[in-house]
Every structure is written in structure tokens, then in C-alpha cells.
Image: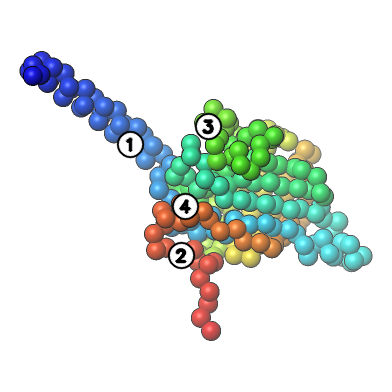
Amino acid sequence: MPTERNGNHTMLLTLAITLIGSVVVFGQSSNPEFRVPTHKAFNYAYMLSGTFININQENSSQNGDQNALPYDILAFTITPVVVTALQPALTFTVDQYVNGRPARYHLMTVFEDDEGLVNLKHYIIPNNLTASDVPNLQLEDIVEEAGCTAKYSTVTNKLFVGYWPACTQYEVNVPQRYVVTITCEAFTMSVPATQNQPESSYDLPYINYKIEQYPLPASVLEQAGDFQPSCAIKPEC
């Protein structure tokens, strides 16, 4: 039969475990990156998910249009993934090619901050990973790119505008920014005039059209409940 002392010890141990658990949960929920994603974050994530190419600019250059700027050929594959160590954050891999050559590969989370801005936080991950390796990444495998969080404001529920710091491995601690707009069909990108970015810089932006939409994972959609992204709602005839 347990003594009163043992009973008190058990009660204190249970209380301590409960308090520790509460601190962990509170610590995670106080960071907007790891809260249950908001509808605004879901909206942006759906718009961002897919393959994008500046196809019209590529065609103009190849067809000998004298007025066409010699834009680089850009291709972005932005794939939603579920990384257990980062849940419930909305997470993507970003794979960019410039003129057919690998340019960027990183992990990114999408979340709404306390000011109502959509944030994209970049993480460096090993380049030799396969797609099947990414969900099993541990926190020690992921390195945040310091100062590399992009921020976007909502213009309408189908239009976001913002910036992306020019702070990849190509040029660190540089204040210049990419200026970006994103819609249901495309995103535009004005490249800063820095020497070490992988894209050439022009006065007019790159226009990268979405040629394929990737669905968000089922486990991610469960967090959204009945919410439907604006770009997924088909207009009534």
C-alpha cells in the first residue's frame, strides 16, 4: 500500500511533467511559425505550390524579337512537404534552375506573423538529399538562413506583394531585395542589381507562369478544416 510520502512524490512528479509539457506547448504556440496555419497562410501556400517558368519571355528571346530583353530561363519547382520536425508549419522544398543549371535548393516554411504579414523563412538543407529523405529531416539537419525571411502583404485574397532578401549562399549580408508579386497564375520577380545573384538583372521583372499546380498534403489540409484557398475556388458561370 503506497505511503503518503510516496503519494505526494507521485503527485509532484505528475505536476512537474504537466508543467513542462505546458511550457513546451506554450513555447511552440508563441512562435507564429509553429502555430496552426492561418487561412491567409494557407491561401499563400496554395498559390506558391507548383512549377513556374518564365515561358513567354523565353519564347520572345528565342523567336528573335528585337524588343525582347535577353532574360535568363528560370524554372522553379516549389513542392509541399511534411517535415515531422517542423510540424505544424507549412513547409516546401524550393528547387530553382537558371538556364538549365541548378541555382538554389532549400527548405522554406510559410506562416502569418503577428502583424498579419505572410513570412517565408528559408532553411539550408544538405544538397544530396532525395525527395524521400526530406520528411525525415531532424532539426540538427536544418540551418536557418539568417536574415533571409521574405515578407508579403495581402492586396486581395488572390494577390500578394512583398520582398525576398538577396541573401542566399551566392551573396550573404547584402541589403538588396527581390521585389515579388504573386497571383493565382504567376509570380513576378525584380532581381536586384548585385553581382553574385544567379539571375541577370533588368529594369522589368521576370514573369514566371505556373504550369503545374501541386496539391497540399492531406495532413496539411486537415488543419484548414472547411477553408478553401481562393485560387482553388472556380468562378461560377
Left or right of 218, for residue 143 = right
Position of residue 140 relative to residue 68, above or below, is above
Within 10 Å of disc 1 (Cα), the crowding (few <14, some 14-19, many 20+) is few
Within 10 Å of disc 2 (Cα), the crowding (few <14, some 14-19, many 20+) is some
Q: Are marks 3 and 4 in contact (CB under 8 Å)?
A: no
Q: Are marks 3 and 1 in contact (CB under 8 Å)?
A: no
Q: Amino acid at mark 4?
A: Val
Q: Which residue is mark 4?
A: 220
**Coordinates of residue 112 in the picture (x, y in percent):** 46, 49
Hey, which quadrant is residue 9 in on the image?
top left
- Under circle 2, the secondary element is loop
Q: Which residue is mark 3?
A: 138
The answer for how far apart the CA atoms under marks 1 and 4 are is 21 Å
Residue lying farthest to the bottom in this orientation:
237
The answer for how far apart the CA atoms under marks 1 and 2 are is 28 Å
Identify which residue, 217 or 24, lies in the foreground: 217
- Under circle 3, the secondary element is loop
Q: Earlier in the sequence, mark 1 or mark 4?
A: 1
- Under circle 1, the secondary element is helix
Q: Amino acid at mark 2?
A: Gln
